[in-house]
Image (cartoon, coloured by chain):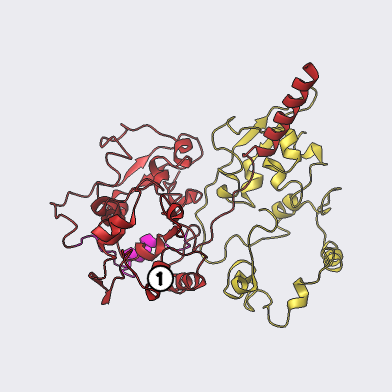
Chain colours: A red, B yellow
Amino acid sequence: MKKLLFIILLIVSLAGLCFAQGGVKKKRPKPHEYGKVTLNNYATKVGIAPVEFDHWTHRGKFTCRLCHVDIGFSMKTGETQIKAADNMRGYFCGTCHNDKMSFEGRRVFAACSKEFTKGDVKRCERCHAAAPNPTKETDFYKFAERLPKERFGNGIDWEKAEETGLIKPVDFLEGVSIKRAPMAAQKDFYIGSKIEGMPDIIFSHKKHTVWNGCELCHPEIFVGVKKGATKYSMIELFDRKYCGVCHDTVAFPQIDCQRCHTKPL
Amino acid sequence: MKVNTTEISEATNRRGKFCGSCHNGKIAFRPNGNCDKCHTGDIGSGRDNYSLFSKAPFPRTEFGNGIDWVEALRRKLISPANHLKSKPQDIPFDKTLMLEAEMAMISPAIFPHKAHTEWLDCNSCHPDIFNIKKKTTKHFSMSYILRGDFCGTCHLNVAFPMNDCKRCHP
């Protein structure tokens, strides 16, 4: 009996050794794959390929705020629970993908329909792709070619692209967004780093409100509108909390230390 | 930093990614007409080039490549390019850490950030390989290091190998 227990313990501890996850370098997603979200609450259950949503196709055209505040998409995979019925009713993807809205001179294709012909299946497959689409990859590199470069993530400096007017993300949709009185942009401020030797962070509200307004971060991600009210450290950030909600998923990843830790020592 | 996980293909190289970032005819030799320079099928095919290269007056070690790369850099015998297009901002982090050994009679390992930041970027190791908060890296012990985790990511196959105990445990 004791021998059996010992053998079981040995196997379990060896198995633990094999699955230890620290100490290895993670593989970086390719530039065209960064920001990809798989939407599959119901798709495979009903026998259709899950949707592979690429953020880059929309980032150049719309602000984060428009989709995540006005239209109401959740910022966590699997939380929004989009159904084809929602799209057909004009919610979520269906807000624009309804064959009625016109954008950049073209009609936006309808997402999901109750009845469809064989010819329509191609439209379904634009999102519900069973296999990775090589055209999408080439489209990405063609798109990225004319934009300023960055080190990680998509390899695109989205901030600079917006600043220099190469992209003009839309922040207001008629019939969807409600116009509110704009609030004054807050000043830049320093966030002290806890480790001696690491430069402090310079946080710019202006750079963020261009994409997010106020509502995207406050109060759900950052409770304290008062400086210093929310306490956090890099450990939580790497765990996809606070700044890590966006910066590691869609915005430039946090391995680019030098983009935030910029206050001269 | 793991073999066969980058997914390099001829298409990506010709597009200017990975090998193609330099091997485009402008910085280094281009792919056209040079296939056999890399696709040799022989992992030891660099031996002639190496014997020529190592004849230069580098400081020596007994292990690994036989060249003390760190000392060579300090003496400015080599000046490896640090960036291709845009210069990343430097964070001059210089902390030296003393890592206690698990076994008695083994001197603690001295870890100098400076010797590493001369070659690497912060994100080469943080936060994937090493946690940024002191003493919070889980399973950080010699048995894991020796099988390729943590320090072993580099100090088993590219940087000086861990046979050279005294270089870390003086």
Is residue A158 inside the magenta stretch?
yes
- Between A171 and B44, the residue placed more toward the observer is A171
The answer to whether residue A92 shows anywhere in this view is: no
Outermost top residue: A2
At x 49% / y 60%, what residue is drawn? Answer: A33
Q: Residues within 10 Å of mark 1 (few under 14, many from 20)?
A: few
Outermost bottom residue: B33
Image height check: is A185 above or below B86?
above
Q: What percent of the width, then of the height, locates residue A59?
A: 35, 62
Relative to A179, A219 lies left or right: right
Q: What percent of the width, then of the height, locates residue A88?
A: 27, 60
- Between B28 and A221, the residue placed more toward the observer is A221
Is residue A233 inside the magenta stretch?
no
The answer to whether residue A69 shows anywhere in this view is: yes
Indicate the secondary structure of the residue bearing disc 1.
Answer: helix
Image height check: is B3 above or below A19?
below
Dominant SS in magenta: loop
Q: What percent of the width, then of the height, locates residue B16?
A: 58, 72
Image height check: is A4 above or below A114?
above
Subunit under mark 1? A
**Mark 1: amino acid:** Val
Mark 1, residue position = A121
Quadrant position of the C terminus of chain A in the picture: top left
Relative to B80, A121 lies left or right: left
Q: What percent of the width, then of the height, locates residue A74?
A: 33, 48
Range of residues picked out in magenta: A154-173
Quadrant position of the N terminus of chain A in the picture: top right
At x 77% / y 74%, what residue is drawn? Answer: B37
Image height check: is A240 above or below A125?
above
Relative to B28, A64 lies left or right: left
Picture quadrant of residue B75: bottom right
At x 86% / y 68%, what residue is drawn? Answer: B48
